[in-house]
Image (cartoon, grey):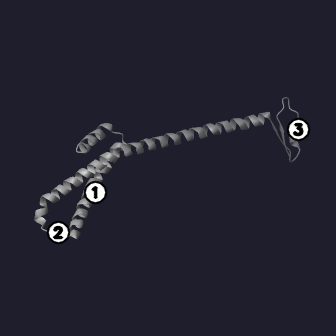
Amino acid sequence: MCMIDISVPRNIDPNVAKVPNIFIFDIDDLESVISSNIREREREAERAELIVQSEVMQFQQSLRLMDMGPTIGALRNRMQAIARAELDKHRKNLGSLTPDQETAIEHLLRSTVNKISHPVLNQMRRFYEASDPETMQELNDTFRAEE
Protein backbone atom coordinates (compact mmCIF):
# COMPACT_ATOMS: atom_id res chain seq x y z
CA MET A 1 0.00 0.00 0.00
CA CYS A 2 1.23 3.48 -0.77
CA MET A 3 0.19 6.39 1.43
CA ILE A 4 0.88 10.04 0.64
CA ASP A 5 0.73 12.52 3.50
CA ILE A 6 0.90 16.08 2.17
CA SER A 7 -0.52 17.74 5.26
CA VAL A 8 1.44 19.90 7.69
CA PRO A 9 1.58 18.76 10.40
CA ARG A 10 1.56 15.15 9.29
CA ASN A 11 -1.62 13.12 9.63
CA ILE A 12 0.00 9.68 9.26
CA ASP A 13 2.27 8.42 12.00
CA PRO A 14 5.78 7.76 10.51
CA ASN A 15 5.87 4.42 12.38
CA VAL A 16 3.23 3.10 9.98
CA ALA A 17 6.08 2.76 7.45
CA LYS A 18 7.48 -0.04 9.59
CA VAL A 19 4.54 -2.24 8.64
CA PRO A 20 5.51 -4.57 5.76
CA ASN A 21 4.31 -3.53 2.27
CA ILE A 22 3.22 -0.05 3.38
CA PHE A 23 5.04 2.91 1.91
CA ILE A 24 4.54 6.43 3.20
CA PHE A 25 5.53 9.53 1.28
CA ASP A 26 5.32 12.87 3.02
CA ILE A 27 5.75 16.46 1.85
CA ASP A 28 9.56 16.27 2.37
CA ASP A 29 9.76 13.24 0.07
CA LEU A 30 7.74 15.05 -2.56
CA GLU A 31 9.95 18.13 -2.29
CA SER A 32 13.06 16.01 -2.91
CA VAL A 33 11.38 14.47 -5.98
CA ILE A 34 10.46 17.95 -7.20
CA SER A 35 14.04 19.18 -6.68
CA SER A 36 15.39 16.19 -8.53
CA ASN A 37 12.97 16.78 -11.41
CA ILE A 38 13.90 20.46 -11.57
CA ARG A 39 17.62 19.59 -11.78
CA GLU A 40 16.89 17.07 -14.53
CA ARG A 41 14.83 19.62 -16.46
CA GLU A 42 17.65 22.16 -16.17
CA ARG A 43 20.11 19.60 -17.58
CA GLU A 44 17.72 18.81 -20.42
CA ALA A 45 17.21 22.52 -21.08
CA GLU A 46 20.98 22.95 -21.42
CA ARG A 47 21.12 20.01 -23.84
CA ALA A 48 18.22 21.49 -25.82
CA GLU A 49 20.00 24.84 -25.98
CA LEU A 50 23.11 23.16 -27.40
CA ILE A 51 20.99 21.37 -29.98
CA VAL A 52 19.31 24.64 -30.99
CA GLN A 53 22.69 26.40 -31.26
CA SER A 54 24.02 23.59 -33.44
CA GLU A 55 20.97 23.69 -35.70
CA VAL A 56 21.19 27.48 -36.01
CA MET A 57 24.83 27.19 -37.07
CA GLN A 58 23.95 24.53 -39.64
CA PHE A 59 21.07 26.65 -40.94
CA GLN A 60 23.33 29.70 -41.25
CA GLN A 61 25.88 27.59 -43.10
CA SER A 62 23.24 26.32 -45.52
CA LEU A 63 22.11 29.92 -46.11
CA ARG A 64 25.71 30.89 -46.92
CA LEU A 65 25.96 27.94 -49.32
CA MET A 66 22.73 29.05 -51.00
CA ASP A 67 24.26 32.50 -51.44
CA MET A 68 27.14 30.78 -53.16
CA GLY A 69 24.90 29.30 -55.87
CA PRO A 70 25.01 32.25 -58.28
CA THR A 71 28.81 32.46 -57.97
CA ILE A 72 29.17 28.75 -58.71
CA GLY A 73 26.82 29.09 -61.67
CA ALA A 74 28.77 32.08 -62.96
CA LEU A 75 32.06 30.20 -62.63
CA ARG A 76 30.72 27.16 -64.47
CA ASN A 77 29.18 29.33 -67.21
CA ARG A 78 32.43 31.21 -67.64
CA MET A 79 34.46 28.01 -67.89
CA GLN A 80 31.96 26.50 -70.35
CA ALA A 81 32.11 29.67 -72.44
CA ILE A 82 35.90 29.50 -72.54
CA ALA A 83 35.74 25.84 -73.60
CA ARG A 84 33.19 26.61 -76.35
CA ALA A 85 35.26 29.58 -77.54
CA GLU A 86 38.32 27.34 -77.83
CA LEU A 87 36.27 24.76 -79.73
CA ASP A 88 35.01 27.44 -82.12
CA LYS A 89 38.55 28.73 -82.56
CA HIS A 90 39.85 25.28 -83.55
CA ARG A 91 36.72 23.97 -85.31
CA LYS A 92 38.20 24.52 -88.80
CA ASN A 93 41.01 22.10 -87.92
CA LEU A 94 38.42 19.38 -87.10
CA GLY A 95 36.80 19.33 -90.50
CA SER A 96 33.16 18.35 -90.88
CA LEU A 97 31.75 16.48 -87.91
CA THR A 98 28.79 14.16 -87.67
CA PRO A 99 26.07 14.96 -85.13
CA ASP A 100 27.39 12.12 -82.95
CA GLN A 101 30.88 13.60 -83.05
CA GLU A 102 29.50 17.05 -82.16
CA THR A 103 27.66 15.51 -79.21
CA ALA A 104 30.79 13.64 -78.11
CA ILE A 105 32.86 16.82 -78.23
CA GLU A 106 30.23 18.76 -76.25
CA HIS A 107 30.18 15.97 -73.66
CA LEU A 108 33.99 15.97 -73.53
CA LEU A 109 34.09 19.74 -72.98
CA ARG A 110 31.39 19.64 -70.30
CA SER A 111 32.99 16.77 -68.36
CA THR A 112 36.46 18.34 -68.62
CA VAL A 113 35.17 21.67 -67.30
CA ASN A 114 33.36 19.87 -64.47
CA LYS A 115 36.50 17.96 -63.47
CA ILE A 116 38.65 21.09 -63.58
CA SER A 117 36.13 23.18 -61.66
CA HIS A 118 35.43 20.57 -58.96
CA PRO A 119 38.47 21.37 -56.73
CA VAL A 120 37.85 25.10 -57.16
CA LEU A 121 34.22 24.72 -56.11
CA ASN A 122 35.21 22.64 -53.10
CA GLN A 123 37.64 25.36 -52.03
CA MET A 124 34.91 27.97 -52.47
CA ARG A 125 32.62 25.91 -50.23
CA ARG A 126 35.35 25.74 -47.58
CA PHE A 127 35.72 29.53 -47.72
CA TYR A 128 31.98 29.89 -47.25
CA GLU A 129 31.95 27.39 -44.39
CA ALA A 130 34.84 29.24 -42.76
CA SER A 131 32.88 32.48 -43.19
CA ASP A 132 35.77 34.20 -44.93
CA PRO A 133 33.77 37.14 -46.32
CA GLU A 134 36.68 38.97 -47.96
CA THR A 135 37.79 35.97 -49.98
CA MET A 136 34.21 35.16 -50.93
CA GLN A 137 33.58 38.73 -52.04
CA GLU A 138 36.70 38.56 -54.22
CA LEU A 139 35.47 35.31 -55.76
CA ASN A 140 32.02 36.80 -56.31
CA ASP A 141 33.53 39.85 -57.96
CA THR A 142 35.83 37.73 -60.14
CA PHE A 143 33.36 35.19 -61.42
CA ARG A 144 30.18 37.23 -61.50
CA ALA A 145 31.74 40.27 -63.19
CA GLU A 146 31.33 38.62 -66.57
CA GLU A 147 27.56 38.10 -66.21
Instruction: Tell me whether circle 1 and circle 2 mark residues in contact (CB < 8 Å).
Output: no
Q: Say which element carries label 3.
A: helix
* Rendered location of residue 100, percent (x, y): 23, 70
* Rendered location of residue 71, percent (x, y): 30, 46
Which class describes the residues within 10 Å of circle 2: few (<14), some (14-19), or many (20+)? few
Vertical position of residue 78 compared to residue 100: above or below: above
Whichever of labels 1 and 3 marks the residue nearer the N terminus, that label is: 3
Residue, disc 1 = 114
Q: Nearer the viewer, mark 1 or mark 3?
A: 1
Quadrant of the rendered image containing residue 98: bottom left
Residue, disc 2 = 97
Residue occupying the point 25% across, 55% down:
116
Front-most of residues 4 and 80: 80
* Rendered location of residue 143, percent (x, y): 25, 45
Quadrant of the rendered image containing residue 103: bottom left
Residue, disc 3 = 15
Report, in whole angstroms, how far the alpha carbon at label 2 lies from the one at label 3: 104 Å
Q: Is residue 11 left or right of residue 114?
A: right
Q: What amino acid does circle 2 point to?
A: Leu
Residue occupying the point 47% across, 41% down:
56
Q: What amino acid does circle 1 point to?
A: Asn
Q: What amino acid does circle 3 point to?
A: Asn
Whichever of labels 2 and 3 marks the residue nearer the N terminus, that label is: 3
| Quadrant of the snapshot with the C terminus | top left
Residue occupying the point 86% across, 45% down:
22
* Rendered location of residue 18, percent (x, y): 87, 42
Report, in whole angstroms, how far the alpha carbon at label 1 lies from the one at label 3: 83 Å
Instruction: Tell me whether circle 1 and circle 3 mark residues in contact (CB < 8 Å).
Output: no
